[in-house]
Amino acid sequence: FGSSLITCNDTGIKVERKWYNTTTCDGDFDKEEYYSNGDSVECTGIDCSYAIIRQYDALLCPHSVYEDFDESTIITGQCAQNGNNSWVQAECIDDNIETMVYSDASCTPGTGQSVSTIIDKGCGISKYTYEEI
């Protein structure tokens, strides 16, 4: 077996797509079947921008010699009030994904202040490597 992805197909049905003999979910999938397990998948939600982050299970850099990784998703560009008369959103800036704080709900790009870096591309201090997809 290779890789699999739980997603929604074009008709809004929860499915598992499988790619055989590969470590990524790129290109045409080999098999798609209805996914009935308990994992929650919302197929009628709003469309939004996001970044897929790969965390390679490598204690040494570079990651190119390693094939094992975990993927996670971070929603970007969605402005949300944080309860302190300020608004926050994750943004892709250069090779990083940063938490930006804004003074109003418009979250106009270029007007916020970076308060933390969520993902720093390359070899992080945790000795894991990250790659923004």
Image: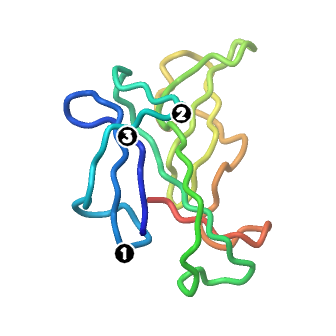
User: Residue 30 in the image: x percent, y percent?
Assistant: 25, 61
Q: How is the image coloured?
A: rainbow
Q: Can you identify the residue that label 3 sits on?
A: 7
The amino acid on which the numbered mark 3 sits, given as a three-letter code, is: Thr
Disc ID at residue 12: none
Alpha-carbon distance for marks 1 and 3? Answer: 20 Å
Alpha-carbon distance for marks 3 and 2? Answer: 11 Å
Q: Upstream in the sequence, badge 3 or badge 2? A: 3
- Which SS class for mark 2? loop
Q: Upstream in the sequence, badge 1 or badge 3? A: 3
Closer to us: 120 or 46? 46
Give the residue drawn at x 79%, y 68%: 125
In the displayed structure image, the side of residue 49 where residue 67 appears, left or right = right
Tag 1–tag 3 contact (CB < 8 Å)? no
Q: Can you identify the residue that label 1 sits on?
A: 21
Give the residue drawn at x 37%, y 75%: 21
Closer to us: 30 or 124? 30
Q: Can you identify the residue that label 2 sits on?
A: 39
**Quadrant for the C terminus in the image:** bottom left
User: Residue 83 in the image: x percent, y percent?
Assistant: 73, 13
Closer to us: 9 or 130? 9
User: Residue 124 in the image: x percent, y percent?
Assistant: 72, 68
**Quarter assignment of residue 104:** top right
